[in-house]
């Protein structure tokens, strides 16, 4: 019984410690995604040409 | 225009039989004008075609609606242009994608089959029990008092 309680306590502490970091990482990823989407929307031609160029280079490397 | 004037135009020679300025002769200036007109016409037509193509394709709208998809499509187009289609990497990617696709398609199918089978087994056993109970009701409560399942006999 005591062991279960101890285990629960440890798990709760671990969760309390990790949860803020996970939340922060989630927020960062979401922010990055938003910035990437807005950049693509603002510069569609540049992004598409860049993507085509990148794909071309990857294709050239893959075809060797 | 000024081509009818004595065979010259701004000091340029007229074209014709040995420099004679006939009624049907075309000066170099006229020819230049005509070429520039044709070029302008071709340019305006090209611009019209390009703008029409832009409207039809609606690339900006598509990018606004689905930015990542369009970038991925552009990457794919570049990859194909780079000659990566008939390459070992493409074959490997294709095999992996096929395997994942088959799994993704097969798992719900198998899940449905198993669920249907389990439901059929459960409903079948319940039906058997119901039938057994109905059949054993004639035996009376004697067997129930004995603690035996009359329907299973």
Image (cartoon, coloured by chain):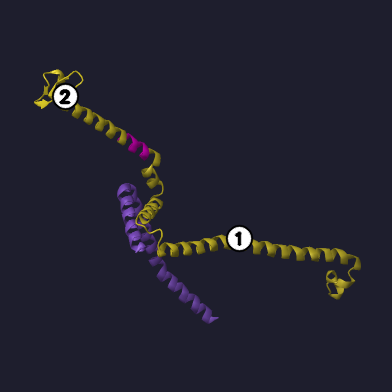
Q: Is residue A1 left or right of residue B29?
A: right
Q: Is residue B86 left or right of residue B43?
A: right
Identify residue for label 1: B109
The chain ID associated with circle 2 is: B
- Closest to the observer, B111 or A64: A64
Looking at the rendered structure, which numbered label has been put on residue B17?
Answer: 2
- Judged by its main secondary structure, the magenta piece is helix
**Secondary element at image label 1:** helix
Q: Position of residue B95 (x, y in %)?
A: 48, 64
Select label 2 or label 1 by which is in front.
Answer: 2
Apparent colour of chain B: yellow
Q: Position of residue A63 (x, y in %)?
A: 36, 62
Q: Is residue B23 above or below residue B99?
A: above
Give the residue displayed 16% in from the left and 28% down from the top.
B28
- Closest to the observer, B65 or B18: B18
Question: Which segment is the magenta one?
Answer: B47-54
């Amino acid at each position: 019984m005591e062991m279960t309680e101890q285990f629960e306590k440890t798990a709760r502490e671990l969760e309390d410690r990790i949860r803020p970091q996970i939340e922060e990482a989630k927020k960062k990823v979401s922010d990055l995604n938003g910035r990437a989407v807005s950049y693509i929307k603002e510069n569609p031609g540049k992004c598409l040409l860049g993507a085509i160029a990148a794909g071309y280079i990857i294709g050239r490397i893959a075809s060797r | 225009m000024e081509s009818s004037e004595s065979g010259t135009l701004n000091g340029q020679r007229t074209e014709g039989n040995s420099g004679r300025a006939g009624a049907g002769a075309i000066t170099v200036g006229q020819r230049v004008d005509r070429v520039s007109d044709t070029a302008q016409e071709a340019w305006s037509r090209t611009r019209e075609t390009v703008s029409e193509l832009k409207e039809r394709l609606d690339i900006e709208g598509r990018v606004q609606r689905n930015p990542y998809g369009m970038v991925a499509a552009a990457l794919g187009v570049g990859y194909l242009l780079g000659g990566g289609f008939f390459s070992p990497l493409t074959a490997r990617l294709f095999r992996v994608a096929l395997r994942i696709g088959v799994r993704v398609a097969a798992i719900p199918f198998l899940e449905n089959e198993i669920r249907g089978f389990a439901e059929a087994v459960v409903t079948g056993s319940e039906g058997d029990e119901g039938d057994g109970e109905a059949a054993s009701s004639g035996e009376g409560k004697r067997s129930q008092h004995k603690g035996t399942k009359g329907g299973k006999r």
